[in-house]
Amino acid sequence: MCTALTLQTQDGYNLFGRNMDIEFSFSQSILLIPRNFNYTDNITGKTQKSKYAIIGMGTLLGTYPALADGLNEKGLACAGLNFPGYVHYEENVLEDKINLAPYDVIFWILNNFDSIEALKKELPHINIVKKPFNESTPLPTLHWIVVDKKGACIVIEKTKEKLSIYDNAIGVLSNAPTFDWHMTNLRQYINVDPHQPIATSWNNQELAPLGQGLGSFGLPGDFSTVSRFVRIAFLKSKIGNPINELNGISEFFHMLNNVSMVTGSVITPQEKNDITLYTSCMSQQKGIYYYTTYNNSRINAIDMNKEDLDGDQVKVFPYLDTQDINYQN
């Protein structure tokens, strides 16, 4: 369960981020991966060196940075969202393909590309392989949303039928079903409008709206993947372009809060609470990673350009999950 969002401001900034909806912590931290970081390819076993510096939320599996979402120094951003029931990974490595495990995809994209245009040229050559990182780490079932700092956005999905690459003009994503299904489903909600309906009459009986907000009657309010997709797409389409980056960051968190999960709202078959563990927002032009957590609603930020991007070790920033209140007296 997750929701991703893109947003452009009037002064030229592009923002990207997501809600991480999950029933457990995955030892997540903000990771800064510098340009000269040496890592082992999990498929080939070869040692390679990073090309672009990256900042994102993830966890270190040994020394390997497994990313949930992130941004590189060129302003390309990516997130992986749960895609159960539809995802299909290949069993075998193919010699004529770029073989990737699903937990490698985000790192591969951000490590190698600076734009959607460049990425789309290579995507037909990838082969996503069903290879766990180790016996204790479950294989993630994912599809991916990628956006560059010019606002170009795509969705990548690997199903049993094919590898699909969708242009994503609406700039949002949730979970299953497939992206094209979600886009078709949006047509059922074209009557939803933020404006108040006008009074009318039925058989000489005057009927006026009861209070504000009736124009959006029919907008789904539950936490299912389909409803969250519709709701975040509606909110983005109606908010327009915030006047500047700071205003955009504020609106970004407000919109994702509208599709976030609280304790008791979604309970898994294992009787665990599915909650919005964290919300991220990345400034793609500035290279700043903003985030809030379930237990800490204050926005924290890490600027990758204040760090040594030519280093060779992953830097781990603490995940600030204790409520931080600014007392005014």
Image (tube, helix red, strand yellow):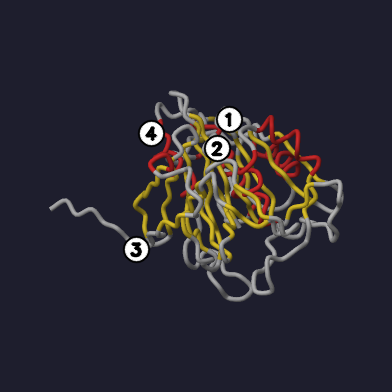
- Count the numbered circles shown: 4
> What is the quadrant of the N terminus in the image?
bottom right
Q: Residues within 10 Å of mark 4 (few under 14, many from 20)?
A: few
Q: Residue furthest top?
A: 11
Answer with left or right where residue 208 lies relative to residue 50: left
Q: Quadrant of residue 141?
A: bottom right
| Disc 1 element | loop
Q: Quadrant of residue 146?
A: top right
Q: Position of residue 317 (x, y in %)?
A: 41, 56
Mark pair 2, 3: CA separation:
27 Å
Q: Position of residue 92 (x, y in %)?
A: 85, 59
Mark whose residue sits in front, 4 or 3: 3
- The residue beneath circle 4 is 247
- What residue appears at the point 62 percent right and 76 percent down from the top-left corner? 270
Do residues under tags 1 and 2 come within 8 Å of each other at their CB atoms?
A: yes
Q: Residues within 10 Å of mark 3 (few under 14, many from 20)?
A: few
Q: Earlier in the sequence, mark 2 or mark 3?
A: 2
Looking at the rendered structure, the kind of residue marked 3 is Thr
| Disc 2 element | strand
| Disc 4 element | helix
- The residue beneath circle 1 is 151
- The residue beneath circle 2 is 6
Mark pair 4, 1: CA separation:
18 Å
